[in-house]
Every structure is written in C-alpha cells, then in structure tokens.
Image (cartoon, rainbow, N blue to C red):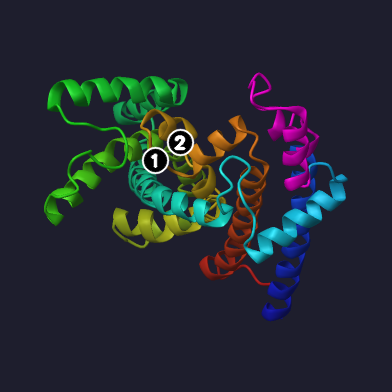
Amino acid sequence: MMFKYFTRALTQRIFLAFLISIIAHAVVHLAPGEPSEVDPSNPLMKPEDIAQIRMAFHLDQPLYLQYAYWIRDLVNGDLKSFKDSQPVLPKIWERFLNSLPLFFVGTLIVWCLSFPTGIYAAVNRGSKYDRLSTFGSYALISLPSFFLAYVAILWVVNNFGVPVLGMRTFGLEDASGISRFMDRVWHLVLPSFLSAMGGVAVLSRYVRSQMLEVIDQDYVRTARSKGLDEDTVIYKHALRNALLPFITMFGLMLPAMVGGSVIVEQIFAWPGLGRLGYEAILNRDYPVILTLNFIAALLTLLGTFISDVLYAVADPRIRLQ
C-alpha cells in the first residue's frame, strides 16, 4: 500500500512538472520584449544582425517549437545563455555551489534560533521575555532587509575594519589554508545572519503559536500528572506533536536554494543563484530564467514529496489507506 501511494504521488508530480514547464515557458516568452531588444540603441546592431540572433536562438519560431528546442537542449546539455553563449547548466551549477553554504548556514541559524525562542515564549506566555520576543519579531519583519544589510556593513567595517563583500578577500590567494578558510567563514557569517533574520522572526512566532495549541491539550496535562519533569513534558510530548506543520515548511525550504536571498546576494556581491536569476531577468536571458524556474519547480515538488514521507515517519497516527 505504501509503495502504491508513493508511486502515485511521484507520477502526479512528474505530470505537474511537465505542466509547470509549459506554463513557465509561455509566461516568460509572452512578456513584452525579447533578448534582441535589450540594447536597441547600439549603433553596431543592424536589423540583419538582430534577425540572425533571433534565428540562432529560434526566436523566429512558433512558441511550441521554441519550447521543444528548449527541452531538447536542456536534456542534451546543449542549452546556452543568450548573454554570453556559455552552457547554462554548468553556469547554474557553479552558482549553486556558491549559494549552498549561504543557504545551509542561514537555514541552520533559522532553525536553531527559532525553536528555542518560540518554545520558551510559549511556555512563559505573557512574561517579559514573551513580550520582548514578540516585539523583536515584528520589528525584524517590518524592517527592510536591505536597510539592515547596509547598517550591518557599516558597523562591521567601522568597528573591525575588515572587508565583507564578495565570497573572499582579494589578495589572499597565496595565503595559508587556515587564513583562506577563516576569510571565507568571515565573509559567510554576515550575509547568512542577515538572510536568516526574517526567517527567525516568522518561524519563532509560528513555533510559539503551535506550542500554545499543544501545551493545553489533555495528554500534556496527563503527562504532568504522572510526575514527569517539565523538560520531558515539553520536549518529548508537546514538541513532537507540534512538529507536523514544520514538516511541510521543511519541504518548502528546498526551492530557497534556487531563489536564495536576491537582495542580500546583490548587496554583498555574493555570486549565487539569486543574483544569477536577477541578472538573467535584466538581460532577458530566457534559457537561464526558464531553467532556474524549472529547477525551482522540481525542488518544490521534491520537497512536498519528502514532506509526505516524513509525515508518515513522524506521526504514527497517520496511516495511508
């Protein structure tokens, strides 16, 4: 029964991926303008040159043929960027490796700070800590991330005198391995922390509300009446039953590997996937935009599939019929 369920869910997601690819392709190509119109004021760009560009990238073909060419080149690994004629998949893979540490550290900060903050606020509902954490969360949600980023950059540079832009400090190529490693860590800390602040603010409020619903349940009062210590009641009985909504959130975190924090990457000159997508939109680089959208859709579907599996693992009350 379990195998049949997962097979059906996987088949549905494959069909959805195909449908999403069609919709995304149509939306991108139906938007006003195309790559050949990025710089119409260029005196070296003649009408016949534009016609050759449109022919080379199949822009003169009907929309369904352009979709077929895109899928064919994507599967064969022959898809190339409109901007620099470089292969799209290696370019995306390189930026993905750059975004991965930022995503991993930011996600680690979000989950490690949100749960203790939300749980402690729920257990001490109405306390000074609960009020301060609520105020801090709303303040972080309200303040623009670019404002916090610029303030943090000014503070770090003025107080520590170290560079924070980019992935590494220029001129340390010949330094020792420890120095290069610590330089990478230093450049990683600030953008990761800033990209995580909004997530900490939202998730901690969500943890608090879920814990408030759970700690008033009868089985929690029964656990306390048995004489169990408070930590066992909160973390073994209450928290486990409050985790189910977060399984869905965990599955939806995978697409963040593609989008990342575009604003943070742009401000810190971090060459990640979010910045690549932003640059592709400005240049109307259809192959890069379409491929990033398609990868994000695949990661979303994969995340929801993983969530379905984790539901059955985390809660024994769930049975697949």
Q: Nearer the viewer, residue 284 or 183?
A: 284
Q: Judge left or right: residue 219 versus residue 101.
A: right
**SS category of the residue bearing label 2:** helix
Extent of the magenta region: 29-58
Left or right: residue 45 compared with residue 165: right
Q: Is residue 32 visible?
A: no
- Residue 105, given in percent of the width and then of the height, sits at 34, 48
Q: Is residue 54 left or right of residue 206?
A: right
The amino acid type of the residue labelled 2 equals: Arg
Q: Label 1: which residue?
A: 118
Look at the numbered discs 2 and 1 and tell me whether their residues touch, using CB distance below 8 Å.
yes
Instruction: Determine whether, in the image, residue 200 is placed left or right of residue 274.
Output: left
Asked if the stretch drawn in magenta spans residue 178, the answer is no
The residue depicted at 33 percent of the width and 21 percent of the height is: 150
Q: Residue at x 36, y 63 (%)?
A: 226
- In the image, residue 272 lies at what x, y percent? 44, 43
Locate the N terminus by quadrant: bottom right
Find the distance from the CA under tag 2 to the CA under tag 1: 6 Å
Q: Mark 1: which amino acid?
A: Gly
Q: Is residue 91 visible?
A: yes
Q: Could you say which disc has been placed on residue 205 in the image?
A: 2
Name the residue located 42 percent from the left edge and 35 percent from the top edge: 265
Please say if 310 is above or below 48.
below
